[in-house]
Image (cartoon, rainbow, N blue to C red):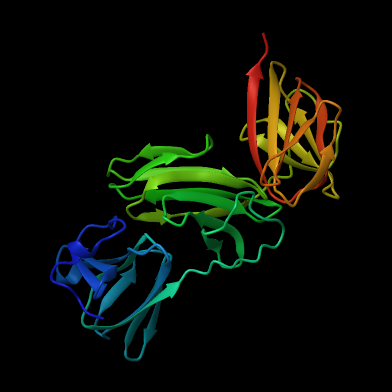
Amino acid sequence: MSATTNPEALLKNGRPSAAGKLVALFPNGECFRIAGGDGDKNQEWSFYNDTRSHEMRIKYLFGPDSDIRALSDKVTTTRKDNGILASVLVPPLSSVGFVKGFINGFESDVVAHPVTQNVTYKNAKPTISTSGMSARALFPDGDAYRLTSQDGTEWYFYNDMPWYEVWLKYTFGPESRIRALHPGVKISKQPNGTFLASATVAPLQTISFVKGSIAGYDSDNIAHPVDKIVKYRNGEPLARGNVFPVYPDGELFRIISFDGTEWNFYNDTKTHEMRVKYTFGPDSDVVAGDPNTRLSKLANGSIVATLAIPPGKTMCLVKGTVNGFESDIVAQKLE
């Protein structure tokens, strides 16, 4: 590993979100250390991974007289006889805060490791074609995945958990130029110039997230158990099973039978018709659950099911085996 006298020229795919002196860790760039802070006794180090296909596994052994603390909960620090060992994993196109404090000497070990693309899903599969995409697990045991197009400009997420929804929160660098790919994705510009993008991925759902030029990011993702205690406002559904609110404040509820073979919906409003559209993955095997359900098959084998649900009604969309899905639901106010 060596530094370069012109590290800015080696940035190819984005820019770090942290400010400070840039030091390239490899001759051709790829991974950079950003040194900031306000003096020798209050240094701040971050790392930026400029690749699209490798994660950076970083270890630094700081001298025994160093006095540092981790800048992120992603960083592990251990006091040893010969100093303080700090380690962190930096995903592609990501900036991660490392340590802060007084640094008195160090040794480093940085390994660029290819991101695994062969993923074994446990409960279903993404409803989009993943050919040529990179797949990165959000959690140590898998459970949810970020799917990135080959050129890195399109991001999708798939939640492989039946009873947890995933709360996504990504902060993209100030020089990022992105737009939402799904109505449920909210993007807001922060006072420091970064862009905050957030969304919720329902159990076994695939969502489109963002598209554009990404110049560094930080993430904070949470797997949240689906609340099984449901309070209805205007009545109760006729169907029984595991209940999932479609909207944060209720209004429409998806009720999956306990054996998983029936998908019912209950409209808890008095004034809106719920126009439900679900696209089920190609490996799904479903039939219409109601005479008014309309089914159509796409070229990729996915099955589109639509149904309009009047206020106060419980209706069955489909019956059968579902293997991944996307949803598009419109609440249409009645005259």
Q: Position of residue 290 (x, y in %)?
A: 85, 30
Instruction: Give the quadrant of residue 63.
Output: bottom left
Q: Who's the residue at 63% across and 26% down the image?
A: 330
Instruction: Give the quadrant of residue 36.
Output: bottom left
Instruction: Give the quadrant of residue 42.
Output: bottom left
Q: Is residue 281 left or right of residue 90?
A: right
- Of 318 and 302, nearer the camera is 302
Q: Is residue 175 left or right of residue 9?
A: right
| Residue 56 at least partly seen | yes
Q: Position of residue 258 (x, y in %)?
A: 84, 48
Q: Is residue 248 above or below residue 38?
A: above
Residue occupying the far top of the picture:
335
Q: Position of residue 38 (x, y in %)?
A: 16, 62
- Of 309 and 85, nearer the camera is 309
Q: Is residue 308 left or right of residue 48?
A: right
| Residue 75 at least partly seen | no
Q: Position of residue 171 (x, y in %)?
A: 39, 49
Q: Who's the residue at 61% across and 66% down the image?
A: 119
